[in-house]
């Protein structure tokens, strides 16, 4: 398991500014710390060291120790104090080192942050953005690989956002920080350094060859609740987010399937219009996520598509997911919903 | 009453303006390190109270430092456990073996044989000596840096390496990250990656042992950084409320990845002193002094076995290497800290003690080190026959679905079939150990 990255911002062949996802996140934080004196970045190892994945590198030095700082190892404390800072009027952006370690903070998130606006009738709000790397594919074993997004989408009052490219990571993170509601921002760590095709035995592509690594300088935002069309296609709709956007895209390309791939970007609130429009056009829908299957976010998507597009469907909605087991270490690639699993599901949908 | 005008909030109307303190370690990369202001007390000077004493009498022990081995390499004072030379040699041997093991496994990770490894260099005494002071069936709930306990309890090296390589010989079926061992046979609890969760579990095990009128006690190990987790504070509360026969070992190795102990509160007080507030016995010991480590653990074990109460022990030590193979400590701390650490190296200190009492010599030390390295090498070779990570020799795919529940429900049966079908598509010729 490796958390270190050595690359620095590089210009692509076309001279454009190319960033990997870590640099794009760092850029967003930097800009928001600059623009808004109420933004606070904190978490385990995020201060002097700049985070175990380097997402906050250089920020403490630039913005000072009371804006960017390390915290005790207490996820409950980190999220709890963020709620308190939010009540004062700050805009904290806590980092949880791995999504697998967010659980000690769940009470503060679920019972407190998510309901503060409602229970105080807007007297108090919790405008925090909890950033956390999630997902597998780095041989991290069961405690560095989980995708717990559905736990959060199930909670009323929390927004859940997952970027899949450097460009989106920056624009979405800026929107999350500006949002007045608590947001969980999950960063797919497998694609921090490059888009992962799912063909794990092939060399990793760096971001700089990907068009979405073109990240303009300065402020821009991507509104929450808007999906992104990754590829246009008539044969089927693929709903995905995070790492699986790239895996699904690679599989469709390899199979020569023309899919309308939607990168959801925001799970709550969901871009239901984009989903409906696409499924009404294609009549077939595949949902792909890395998280476990049972009660996963795919179940929600499947229910929505079935409820709202039933008469347009020409085949049952299919879900491709991780298996309902903890993330195994040695059998990581057997667990991962890779090209074979996705390919089979596509064949099945198209054969109906 | 506040001495600021009511409703007057602007900065400065409170004098001085409120200011946030963010801890900062004394030394950063490149800094010259000087530990001369660190109060490490004197060997042999700490009193050794009766094991049944009241925690309120333990102030000196919770704020001071129990030390036995002096600069003259002799044992001093009432905490000298007076171990016979054979036991001391075994202790030295275990610690040297841990070090040799760490060296080789670290290299193995660098050579791509596995994904991850964590050394305990400089902290060997805190697990080896402590484990030797317990009965072999006292239950331990370790964190990830206590490989010394397994080695002290005679767990076969090959089993450890099989686990590290996640290969087909791994008793944990390749499911866990390397070094997250488990051995019920050695009363060694399954290690979790989630920090501090083991601490209330140890208390619960000890409560169960008390409920049943058993004679076994429980002990847990946790890093100083992890004491910030709520779980640790729950452990302290339950331990004191039920007077549980448990020992809470806090390994203060000064660093939690890149965060120094100040981020767990060490700028204000000691970790052992936390005990007193909870009504637990509290001991602070030199973690690089194997005799002090043994003596403290033995004191706490006696106390627990006498139903006299739980103990929190802080081992003051230093994490000599990086946090793990994923970490590069040159990015956040001064390399001089290790060499300047005023309490030396635990293996060297015990070796010098044995020599000082005429029970050891350099020649035997050299031979022992060589044998330890050979033993690890042989076990590594043997384990490699079962495969290394990512080279096909793993447990069969169906095992991925076993043990989620006692029995396989329908959905896991279906998913298991799918995994096997996928394997056949991926590897039509079949793979070894399919
Ligand atoms: C609940 C939880 N939060 C965060 C982490 C990530 N993490 C792993 S080890 C570590 C540092 C622990 O430091 P310490 O407790 O001092 O033990 P040491 O590594 O020094 O032995 C952190 C933050 C984790 N494993 N679990």
Image (cartoon, helix red, strand yellow):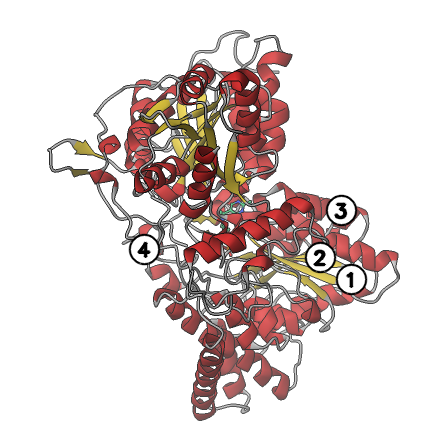
- Characterize the local packing of mark 1: few (<14), some (14-19) or many (20 or more) Cα atoms within 10 angstroms: many
In the rendering, at what x and y percent does residue B38 appear?
Answer: 46, 57
Q: Is residue A173 above or below residue A208?
A: above
Depth check, mark 3 against mark 1: the one in front is 3
Q: Is residue B295 left or right of residue B101?
A: right
Q: Is residue A163 left or right of residue B150?
A: left
- Residue A95 vs residue A202, the one in the foreground: A202
Marked residue nearer the N-terminal end (3 or 1): 3
Residue drawn at 34 percent across, 43 percent down: A196
Residue A214 lies in quadrant: top left
- Residue B12 vs residue B182, the one in the foreground: B182
Q: Are marks 1 and 2 in contact (CB under 8 Å)?
A: yes
Quarter that holds the N terminus of chain A: bottom left
Mark 4 chain? B
Marked residue nearer the N-terminal end (1 or 4): 1
Marked residue nearer the N-terminal end (3 or 2): 3
Mark 3 chain? B
Q: Could you tell me how far apart the alpha carbons at marks 1 and 2 are, in whole angstroms?
A: 8 Å
User: Which residue is label 2 attached to?
Assistant: B311
Q: Could you tell me how far apart the alpha carbons at marks 3 and 2 are, in whole angstroms?
A: 12 Å
Q: Is residue B229 left or right of residue A286?
A: right
Numbered label attached to residue B304:
1
Question: Are marks 3 and 2 in one subunit?
Answer: yes
Marked residue nearer the N-terminal end (1 or 2): 1
Q: Is residue B88 above or below residue B416?
A: below
Q: Is residue A302 above or below residue B309?
A: above
Q: Is mark 4 within 8 Å of ligand 1?
A: no
Marked residue nearer the N-terminal end (3 or 4): 3
Q: Are marks 1 and 4 in contact (CB under 8 Å)?
A: no
Question: Are marks 4 and 2 in one subunit?
Answer: yes
User: Which residue is label 3 attached to?
Assistant: B238
């Amino acid at each position: 398991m490796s958390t270190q990255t050595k690359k620095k911002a590089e210009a692509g062949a076309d001279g454009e500014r190319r960033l990997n996802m870590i640099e794009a996140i760092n850029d967003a934080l930097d800009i928001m710390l600059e623009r808004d004196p109420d933004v606070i970045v904190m978490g385990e190892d995020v201060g002097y060291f700049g985070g175990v994945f380097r997402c906050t590198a250089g920020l403490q030095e630039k913005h000072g120790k009371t804006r960017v700082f390390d915290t005790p190892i207490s996820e409950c404390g980190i999220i709890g104090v963020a709620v308190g800072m939010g009540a004062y009027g700050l805009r904290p952006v806590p980092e949880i080192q791995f999504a697998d370690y967010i659980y000690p903070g769940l009470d503060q998130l679920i019972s407190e942050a998510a309901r503060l606006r409602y229970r105080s009738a807007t007297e108090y709000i919790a405008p925090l953005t909890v950033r956390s790397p999630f997902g597998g594919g780095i041989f991290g074993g069961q405690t560095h690989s989980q995708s717990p997004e559905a736990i959060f989408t199930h909670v009323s009052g929390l927004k859940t956002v997952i970027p899949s490219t450097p460009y989106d990571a920056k624009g979405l993170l800026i929107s999350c920080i500006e949002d007045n509601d608590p947001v969980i921002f999950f960063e797919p760590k497998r694609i921090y350094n490059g888009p992962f095709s799912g063909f794990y035995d092939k060399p990793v592509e760096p971001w700089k060859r990907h068009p979405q690594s073109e990240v303009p300088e300065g402020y821009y935002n991507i509104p929450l609740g808007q999906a992104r069309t990754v590829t246009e296609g008539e044969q089927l709709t693929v709903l995905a987010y995070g790492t699986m956007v790239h895996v699904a895209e690679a599989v469709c390309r390899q199979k020569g399937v023309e899919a309308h791939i939607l990168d959801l970007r925001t799970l709550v609130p969901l871009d239901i219009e984009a989903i409906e429009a696409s499924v009404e056009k294609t009549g077939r829908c595949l949902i792909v996520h890395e998280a476990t299957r049972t009660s996963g976010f795919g179940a929600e998507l499947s229910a929505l598509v079935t409820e709202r597009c039933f008469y347009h469907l020409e085949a049952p909605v299919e879900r491709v997911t991780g298996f309902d087991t903890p993330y195994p270490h040695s059998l990581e690639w057997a667990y991962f919903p890779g090209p074979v699993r996705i390919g089979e599901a596509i064949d099945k949908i198209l054969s109906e | 009453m506040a001495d600021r005008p009511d409703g007057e909030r602007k900065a400065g109307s409170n004098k001085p303006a409120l200011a946030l303190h963010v801890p900062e370690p004394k030394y950063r990369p490149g800094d010259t390190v000087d530990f001369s202001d660190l109060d490490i007390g004197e060997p042999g000077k700490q009193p050794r109270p009766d094991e049944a004493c009241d925690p309120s009498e333990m102030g000196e022990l919770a704020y001071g430092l129990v030390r036995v081995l002096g600069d003259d390499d002799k044992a001093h004072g009432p905490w000298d456990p007076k171990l016979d030379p054979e036991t001391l040699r075994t202790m030295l041997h275990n610690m040297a073996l841990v070090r040799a093991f760490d060296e080789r496994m670290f290299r193995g990770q660098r050579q791509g044989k596995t994904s991850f490894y964590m050394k305990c260099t400089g902290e060997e005494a805190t697990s080896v000596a402590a484990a030797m002071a317990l009965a072999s069936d006292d239950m331990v709930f370790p964190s990830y840096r206590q490989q010394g306990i397994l080695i002290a309890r005679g767990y076969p090296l090959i089993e450890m390496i099989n686990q590290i390589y996640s290969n087909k010989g791994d008793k944990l079926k390749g499911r866990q990250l390397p070094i997250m061992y488990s051995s019920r046979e050695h009363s060694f609890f399954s290690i979790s990656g989630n920090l501090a969760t083991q601490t209330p579990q140890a208390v619960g095990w000890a409560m169960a042992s008390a409920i049943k009128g058993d004679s076994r006690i429980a002990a847990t190990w946790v890093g100083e950084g992890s004491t910030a987790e709520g779980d640790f504070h729950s452990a302290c509360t339950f331990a004191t409320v039920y007077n549980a026969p448990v020992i809470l070992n806090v390994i203060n190795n000064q660093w939690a990845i890149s965060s120094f102990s100040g981020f767990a509160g060490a700028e204000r007080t000691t970790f052992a002193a936390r005990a007193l507030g909870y009504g637990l016995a509290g001991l602070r010991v030199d973690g690089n002094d194997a005799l002090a480590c043994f003596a403290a653990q033995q004191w706490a074990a006696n106390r627990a076995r006498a139903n006299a109460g739980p103990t929190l022990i802080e081992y003051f030590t230093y994490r000599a290497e990086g946090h793990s193979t994923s970490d590069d400590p040159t990015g956040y701390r001064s390399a001089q800290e290790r060499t300047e650490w005023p309490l030396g190296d635990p293996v060297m200190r015990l070796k010098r003690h044995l020599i000082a009492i005429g029970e050891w010599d350099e020649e035997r030390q050299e031979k022992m080190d060589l044998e330890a390295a050979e033993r690890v090498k042989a076990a590594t070779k043997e384990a490699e026959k079962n495969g290394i990570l990512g080279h096909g020799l793993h447990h069969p795919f169906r095992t991925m679905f076993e043990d989620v529940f006692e029995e396989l429900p329908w959905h896991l049966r279906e998913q298991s079939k799918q995994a096997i079908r996928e394997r056949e598509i991926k590897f039509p010729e079949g793979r070894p150990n399919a």
